[in-house]
Image: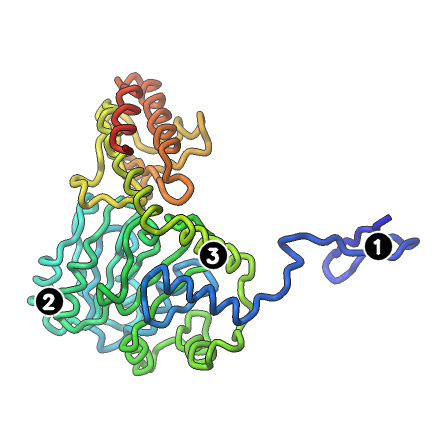
Amino acid sequence: MVTRAFRLGSVESTSPSEESTAVTHPFLDLPPLTAERFAAIEDGVARLLDTRQDVLITQGEALLPLEGAIRAAAGPGTVALNVITGPYGQTFGGWLRDAGATVHDLSVPFHTAVSAEQVREAFAEHPDIDFVSLVHAEAATGNTNPVAEIGEAVRAQGALFYLDAVASVGAEPVLPDAWGVDLCVIGAQKAMGGPAGVSAISVSERAWARMAANPNAPRRSYLSLLDWKERWTDAGRKALPHAPAQLEMLALEACLERIESAGLETVMARHRRAALATRAGAVALGAGLEPYVHEERHAAPVATTLRAPSAAAASDLVARALAADPGLPLAAGGGALAKEMIRVNHYGPDATGDAVHRALDALGAALAELGLPADPAAARRAAAGAWR
C-alpha cells in the first residue's frame, strides 16, 4: 500500500504507521530542462522566422520582450516613429516616451492599415527619425500592416525597426531578415496554438549595438535582454542563467514540432481560409452586421472584427452568443469599442471551418433574439464557399 504525502507549507504530514511515498505527476516530476534542449528550442524559433539573427526565448508573456526591447534600444536622443493602428501601438508610444525618446505618432483609423507611403511622408517631415515601432497584426482591431513594404522604407531611412508579430506569427509570413526587422517579438498563444507564458525575440547585430550604447538599457533586471545576451548567447548557450519555465518551454517545443510537421504554409493557409470564411459569412448573415476592417487586404488572418448593427450593442450580442455556446472564439471589443465591435478569434485550434460556422450560427441566433433579421443558412453557404 502507498501512503500519500501532503505538504502544507514547510510541514509534511504522513501516516505514522507506514513509510510515505510522494505521489508522482507527469507535469510536476520532470527532469530539469537542459541548456542543450533550451538552445534547440531557440533554434526551432529561428527556423520558424527564417532568421540568422540571435533568437532569445524570454521567460514570460510577450509583453516582457516587447517592453524590454524598447527600454533597451530607445532612450534620450532617440527619435521614434510610433505607428498606431490599434491599442498596442498606443502602449508602445507610452513606453518610448517613458524611456526618454522623442516620439512622433503616426495614427490611422483602426478600420484600415498604415501604408509605406505614409511612413515615408513621416520620414520626410521628421528626417531625424532613427527608430520605428509597428504592430504587424492587431488582433484587437482585426487589421494587418504591410511590413515588407514598410521595411523597405525603414531601411532607406536607416532607422532601427521594431516589430510586434505576436498575433501574426503562424497566421501570415513573419520574416525579420527579409524585411529588415531589427527587433521582432513573437508569442505562441495565438496563431501558433501554443502557450501564453513564454515568448521570443530575434535581435539584429545593430540592435545589440544600439542597446550596448544605451546607458539606460535595463541591466540586472527581468527586462534586460543584454543580461541574457552576455550570460547565455555570448557564453555559448552552455549554462542557463536562470531556471526556465519548464512546462511552457516544453509546450513551445511541442507547438513548433506540430507546425513543422504540418508545414507552416499549411497552417497559414488554414488561418487565411478562416478569415475569408468569417468575412463572407458575416456579410451574408445580414441584419446590418458588417466587417469592421473595410478592405479585405487590410484584414488580419488571425481574427476578424465585425461592426455590430446600430440597433444592438456588440457586448450584448457576444454575451447572448456565449450563453448558448461558451466555447465560441468570440469577444466584444475592448473599452470604447465594446458597443460597436465583435471579434471572431479564429486562430490556433479555432482556425477551422467548424469554429467559424458555430460563431456565425450563434451570432445569427443572438440577432434573431433581438428581433433583427438574420440568415444563418446563407451565412453558412457563403462561409463554406469562401473556405473552399
Quadrant housing residue 8: bottom right
Q: Is residue 15 left or right of residue 110?
A: right
Which of the two discs, 2 and 3, sits closer to the camera? 3
Quadrant assignment, res 127: bottom left
Secondary structure beneath disc 1?
loop
For the point 35% across and 47% down, which residue is it? 267
At mark 2, the secondary structure is helix
> How many angstroms separate mark 2 from mark 3 (CA)?
38 Å
240 to 353, vertically: above or below: below
Q: Nearer the viewer, residue 54 or 264?
A: 264
**256 vs 145, nearest the viewer:** 256
Residue 226 image offset from top left, x and y in percent: 40, 77
Q: Is residue 102 visible?
A: no
Residue under the image location 41 percent in, 54 percent down: 260
Residue shown at 34% from the left, 46% from the top: 266
Residue in front for this viewpoint, 292 or 52: 52
Disc 3 target residue: 252
Comes first in the chain, label 1 or label 2: 1
Label 1 Cα neighbours within 10 Å, binned few <14 / some 14-19 / many ≥20: some
Mark seen at residue 14: 1
Residue 123, labelled with which disc?
2
Judging from the image, what secondary structure is the residue with disc 3 in?
helix
In this image, 364 relative to 2: left or right?
left
User: Could you tell me the amino acid type at mark 3?
Assistant: Leu
